[in-house]
Image (cartoon, rainbow, N blue to C red):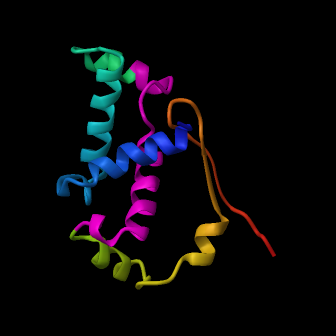
Amino acid sequence: MEVKGKLLKRVHDLLAEEKYRDDDFELAAELWLQDLKEDNIKHISALVFIELFKVGHFTNPDSASRVRRSIQEKNVHLRGANYNSARKVAGRGEQSHDSYEDQYVMEFDARGRLINDVIENKS
């Protein structure tokens, strides 16, 4: 499975639980716990965690947040309670993103970190 697809699936699966829908800190923490379990690490000090985080060992929280927002744009049933109020504050209402979706490109490295996030101009 490609890396983007792996992060997309992980975030999508977590959004089945409401506690991850409006809280990027909660989402990132769970993804990091999954990263630790994947590497069979049961205990880690804060200093070791920070060093591993700095070298990109853990899922990038910004990438996870972007993926969460993308999933929630397309899947009404996975939106949190704050979704519509946050869009109103930002000055965006419900919109169709069909053409936007075709132009948006996200590329991730092997650890799930976003390496390219662009809107391609297809005109």
Counting every numbered tag in the picture gives 0
Q: Compared to 33, does 64 lie above or below?
A: below
- Residue furthest right as drawn: 123
Residue found farthest to the front = 1
Q: Quadrant of the C terminus?
A: bottom right
Residue at 32% from the left image edge and 74% from the top image edge: 86
Q: Position of residue 99 (x, y in %)?
A: 63, 76
Q: Position of residue 60 (x, y in %)?
A: 45, 39
Q: Which of the pair 78/65 is nearer the observer?
A: 78
Residue depicted at x 35% and y 82%? 88
Residue 9 lies left or right of residue 99; in this view the side is: left
Percent position (x, y) of residue 93? 41, 85
Residue 73: quadrant of the picture: bottom left
Residue at 43% from the left image edge and 35% from the top image edge: 59
Question: Is 65 located above or below residue 60 in the figure?
Answer: below
20 or 56: nearer the viewer: 20
Is 4 covered by the magenta stretch? no
Residue 81 image position (x, y, % from top left):
21, 70
Q: Main secondary structure of the magenta part?
A: helix
The residue segment tinted magenta is 51-80
The residue at the point 58 percent across, 69 percent down is 101
Confirm whether the magenta stretch covers residue 54.
yes
Against 104, residue 2 (above or below) is: above
